[in-house]
Image: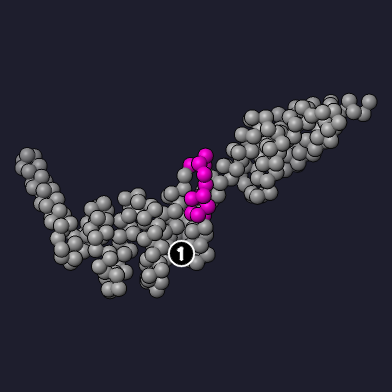
Amino acid sequence: MRKFLYLILAVATLASCSEYQKALKSEDTKVKYKLAERLYKEKKFKKSSRLFEQIVPKFRGKPQGERVTFMYGRTLFEIEQYIVSGYQFERFARSYPKSDSVEVASFYEAKSYYMQSPRFSIDQRDTYTAINKLQGFINNYPDSEHLDDANKMVDELTTKIEKKAYEIAKQYNTISDYKAAIKATENFLSDFPGTSFREDAMYLRLSAMYNLAIRSFETLMEDRLNEAGSAYKSLVKFYPESKYREEADKIMATITEELAKFSK
C-alpha cells in the first residue's frame, strides 16, 4: 500500500513538473497566467514567479495587469528577491494609485527595503533608505493594520543605526583616541537624545574625558579634569543607579585627588 502511494505521488509530481515546463515554453499567455495564479495560491512562489516574470509585460494596460503585477511583486518578496520586489511594489503603487491593494503594496515595498538592511557593523545607507520608506508608509497610512509592524521595524532599524554610531565612539576610546571618542559621544548624545545607549554613551564620555585629562600636559590637566568631573555629575544625575556607578565613582575619586594637587 505504501509503495502504491509513493507511486501515485511520483506520478503526480512528474505530471506537475511536466505541466510547469510546458507552461514555461508555451506561447499561450492564458496558460501561463492560469498556472502562475494556481501556483501562487499553493504558495509555490519560485515557480509562480518565473511564470509571472514572462507575462507581466503582456498585461500592462489590461484589466488583469493590476492583479498580475501585485502577485509578481509578492512572489519576489517571498523568494527573498528583495531588491526586485521593492522595485516592483513601488512600480505597482505608481501604476495603480487607486487600487485597493496599493496600501499593502506600499507596505511590502517598505518591508523589502527593511529586509535589505545589513548588520550594524556594515555601512548603513540601506538602513536609512528603509527607515525613510517605512516612515513614508506610516505617514500615508496612519490607520493601516500594518502600522504596528511598520513602527517596530523603524524602531529596530533606528536602534541599529544608534548601535553603529555608539560602537564607532567606543572604538575611538579603545584605540586611545580620546579626543575623537569625546567628540563622537557628544555628537551621538546630541543626534540620538532618546537612545537606549544613552547611559553607555555618557559613561564612555566620562571615561574618555578622564583618560584624556590624566595624559595631558599640566597646563591643560586641571581644566580637563574639571570637564571630566562635570561628565561624572551628568551621569549620576540621570542614572543614579547606573550599572557603571562603581567604575564612575572610582574615576571621580581619582579626579578629586588630582584636582586637590592644583589647590596646594
Number of disc labels:
1
Residue 247 percent location from the top left of the image: 71, 29
Residue at 89%, 25% in the rendered image: 261
**Where are the magenta residues, as a range?**
119-131
188 or 247, nearer to the observer: 188
Q: Does residue 143 appear left or right of residue 39 in this picture? A: right
Please tell me whether residue 67 is drawn above or below residue 206 in the rendered image: below
Residue at 51%, 62% in the rendered image: 136
Please tell me whether residue 179 is drawn above or below residue 103 in the rendered image: above
Question: Does any portion of residue 242 appear in the rendered image?
Answer: no
Task: Label 1: state its secondary structure.
Answer: loop
Image quarter in which the N terminus is found:
top left
Residue 235 percent location from the top left of the image: 73, 39
Residue at 31%, 69% in the rendered image: 66
Residue at 76%, 38% in the rendered image: 231
- In magenta stretch: residue 130: yes
Q: Which residue is mark 1?
A: 144
- In magenta stretch: residue 86: no
